Image (cartoon, grey):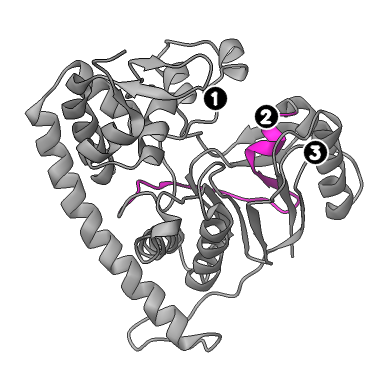
Amino acid sequence: MDALLPIGEFAELSGLSAKRLRTYAAAGLLVPAAVDPDSGYRFYAPGQLREARTIDALRRADVPLAEIHGLLRDPSTRALDDWVQKVELDRDERHEALQRARQLLEIGAVTSTTPGQEPRRERSMKFTAATRTDVGRVREQNQDRAACLDRLLAVADGMGGHPGGDIAASLAIAVVEAAFSGRSLDELQAAARAANAAVFERARADEHLDGMGTTLSAVGLTDDGRLAVVNVGDSRAYLVRDGSLQRLTTDHTLVSELVRQGELSEEDAANHPQRSVLTRAVGVGPTVEVDAALHETRRGDRVVLCSDGLTNEIPEQLILSAMQSEQDVNAWADALLDRALAAGGRDNVTVTVAELSS
C-alpha cells in the first residue's frame, strides 16, 4: 500500500474534491485501488490520475454516467465530436429557457396577450390534487419538495448524501412553478432546463453547495387540454386509466440503464446496491437532458407523481390498487404514504395525486 495515494493526496493531485471521487466510485466509474478494511479509508493508484481527470471533464460536459462507462471502455473522438455539437445546442436552449424564466418572473401574476399571438383557448380541465410528504423512518431530514396546483404537479427529490439537496429541490420546484403557464410541452421542458440552470448557478455561488442536485418530475395541463410530462432522475409520474397503471417517465439511474441494455434483469435491479445512483440530475452540470412527452387526456384520469421513497418500498400493483378506490384525492395520497411507511419508510416519501375534472 506504500505505492498508493491516500484519497486526500489523490484529490489534491487530480484537482477533484474527495466528495467527487466518492461520487464517481459509487457510480462504478473510478473504483479505489484499495480500501483499508478497518477504517474504510480509500487509496488510489497514481495511474488513475488521468482517468479521474477524464471522467471529471466528461461529467462537467454533462455526459451521462452510462455513456462515460462506454467511452472509457472504447475511447472515441467521434463520440466526443457529437457531444460538442450537443453542448452547443444545449447552450442555446439554456439561454432561451433563462430568458423565458426572466420574463415570467418579471411579469409575475400579470397575464396578457402578446401582439401577434392568438388569445389562449378556454381551459376546460384542471387537476383536483393533493400531496403528502414524510421524512420516513430512517432519514433525519426531508429533502423532497412538491408542487400541487390546478394545472401543474411536480415532485423533486434532493440528492441524498450531497449538501443542499433540500435547497436544490426547493429551487427547482419554484422555478418550474414560475415558468410554466400552461402554454405547451416546450414551455414545461424549458422550465425544467431553467430549473437546472438556476440550481447549477446557485451551487457555483456557494462552495458549500458544490455537487448539490435534485430529481424533477413534472406534469402540466396545456392550453389544448393535453398532459405535458417532463422528467430528470428517478422520481416518477404515472397515469391511471381504465383499471391500468401506465408509467409516463423513465428512470435515469445506472441500474435502469443496465436493464435497458439487457445486462441486468428487473428482479436483480430491484435489490441492486447501486439502484439509486443517478445518471441524470437537475443542477449537477450547466445543462441537462430533459425527457419530455405529450399525452391525450380524459376526464376522470388519475395521475400519480412520487419520489423513489414510494417506488422503492411498494410495487406498482399496490399503487394501482390504492388509486382505484372510490375515495377522493386526499384518501389516495394518505393511502400511498401509509403503505410506503408500513413497508419500511427507508427514504423520504412524497406523493402527489390528482384527478382530471372540469
Is 59 colored magenta in this rendering?
Answer: no
| Residue 279 rendering spot, x and y as whole percentages | 41, 34
Q: Nearer the viewer, residue 215 or 47?
A: 47
Looking at the rendering, the stretch of residues picked out in magenta corresponds to: 287-313
Point 32% across, 74% down: residue? 99
For residue 189, say whether it is visible: no
Upstream in the sequence, badge 3 or badge 2? 3
Tell me the number on the disc at residue 27: none
What is the x, y in percent for residue 301? 71, 48
Reading the image, the residue beneath label 3 is: 137
Horizontal side of residue 117 vs 122, given as left or right = left
N-terminal-most mark, 1 or 3: 3
Relative height, residue 142 to residue 49 (above, below): below
Image quarter (top left, top right, bottom left or bottom right) of the N terminus: top left
Given contact means CB atoms under 8 Å apart, are the residues at marks 2 and 1 in contact? yes
Is residue 181 shown left or right of residue 304? left
Quadrant of the image occupied by residue 98: bottom left
Residue type at the position of mark 3: Arg
Q: Quadrant of residue 92?
A: bottom left
Mark 2 lies on a secondary structure that is: loop
Quadrant of image for the C terminus = bottom right
Mark 1, residue position = 275
Q: Which residue is mark 2?
A: 312
